[in-house]
Every structure is written in C-alpha cells, then in structure tokens.
Amino acid sequence: MVKRVSILSAALLLSCLVMSPQALRADTVTTFQDLTEQLSVSTDLGSRITLSTCTNADEVCTMIFFGPSGASLLSPNDVPTTIYISDANGTTLSEILSVTLGSSFPGGPINQIGLKFQSVTEGFSPVCTPSCQMIENGQVQNALTLHWDNGTNDTINFQSDVEPGGVTPEPASLLLLGSGLVGLVGVARRKLSLT
C-alpha cells in the first residue's frame, strides 16, 4: 500500500513538473480593427495591459502592455517600428501601426510594448513609399509576432474594411464609350476620304 502511494505521489509530482512550463506559457492574440469607420481592439492579454483606448473621432487606438512575468523580448532589433498598410489597390496609405519598445527600468530588458493603430486622415492619402508592407483586404492579417524568452508569443493582427477605390465602370458604360469612339473614328475617316 505504501509503495502504491509513493508511486502515485511520484507520478503526480512528475506531471506537475512537466505541466508547469506549459501553464506559464500563454500565447495571446491582439487584433486591431478598422471596420465601417469604427476603430476597436480585441485582446486576450488580460492583466498584462496597462492602457487600452480607442478614439473614433481621431481614428486612433493605443495599447501598452507588459511581457509575460519575468520574460524579456527576444530579438528586439527585428521588431519593426512602423508597419504601413495600404488600400486594396496597394498604392495609397490607409492605416499605420506603430510599435514602441520599452523597459520597466533604465538599462533593463525589453519587457514593455506600446502599440498605436491609426487610420490615415481622409483627404490625406500619401502614396506608399517605397511600398506598404500590408494591403487591406477585409480579412484578419498578421502584422507581427513578438517572441519572449520564456516561449510565449504575442501575435498582433489587424483587420480593415476595404476602402472604396475608384469607381469601376459597368459593362453598359464601357459599351457606350466604345460605340462612341467607333463613331468618332468613322466620322474622322469619312472627313479624310472626302478631302
């Protein structure tokens, strides 16, 4: 009987040791959305968030959060500071995601992330130079993934509705335009043949 209890205790202790790193690791997903001119953010970061606001008047969402407890960011130099998102045509800037890295104390490891998702002001549509990294398509897209030294990953996504671009002519309008051009060519040829 004592042997069974010791084996059971050892098995329980071993399962706790094996499972504990998995319990500390909690991958998260944060999604910034710009749908029908409404900005929002959804996340499962929980208590790691220190600030999360969206202002639809300014079309800006801001979030600040800490890395997992005791973890520091792997390869902070590989994290982009700005991600440019273009309209569906891939030519005009539509949204900007800015990333700021920080530390809890001077000289300490990178363990604080600031995110700012901003819609570009209407009427101000700069061309993506040299090019935008992402194109809005209405789907949830991965903007970046932050990797922490404890194995946790924080995925940052965005989703934007497809901004209406230039009006695409319907077939009837194209037919009317084509027949008008053929008519003009016919009139020009007739005038040339009479002279």
Image (cartoon, rainbow, N blue to C red):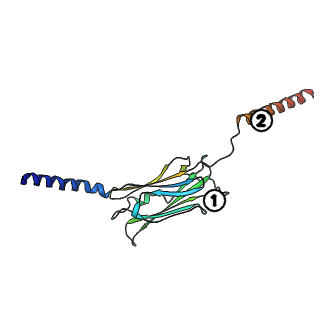
Residue at image point 51% right, 53% down: 158
Query: Can see residue 66?
Result: no
Please name whichever residue, 143 or 108, is drawn nearer the observer in this view of the structure.
143
Q: Residues within 10 Å of mark 2 (few under 14, many from 20)?
A: few
Q: Earlier in the sequence, mark 2 or mark 1?
A: 1
SS for callout 1: loop
Q: Which residue is mark 1?
A: 121
Residue appearing at x 6%, y 52% in the figure:
1
Q: Is residue 85 above or below residue 174?
A: below
Task: Say which quadrant the C terminus sits in.
Answer: top right
Q: In x, y percent, where is residue 9?
A: 14, 55
Question: Tag 2's secondary structure?
Answer: helix
Work out which residue is located at the far bottom of the displayed protein and give it.
106
Residue 167: quadrant of the picture: top right
In this view, the residue farthest toward the right is 195
Amino acid type at circle 1 is Thr
Residue 149, percent from left and from top: 34, 59
Instruction: Look at label 2 and name its amino acid.
Output: Leu
Closer to the camera, 30 or 102? 30
**Label annotation for residue 177:** 2
Position of residue 147 in the picture relative to residue 158 (left or right): left
Residue 68 visible somewhere in the drawing: yes
Q: Is residue 164 left or right of residue 13?
A: right
Taking the image as shown, residue 65 lies to the left or right of residue 135, namely left
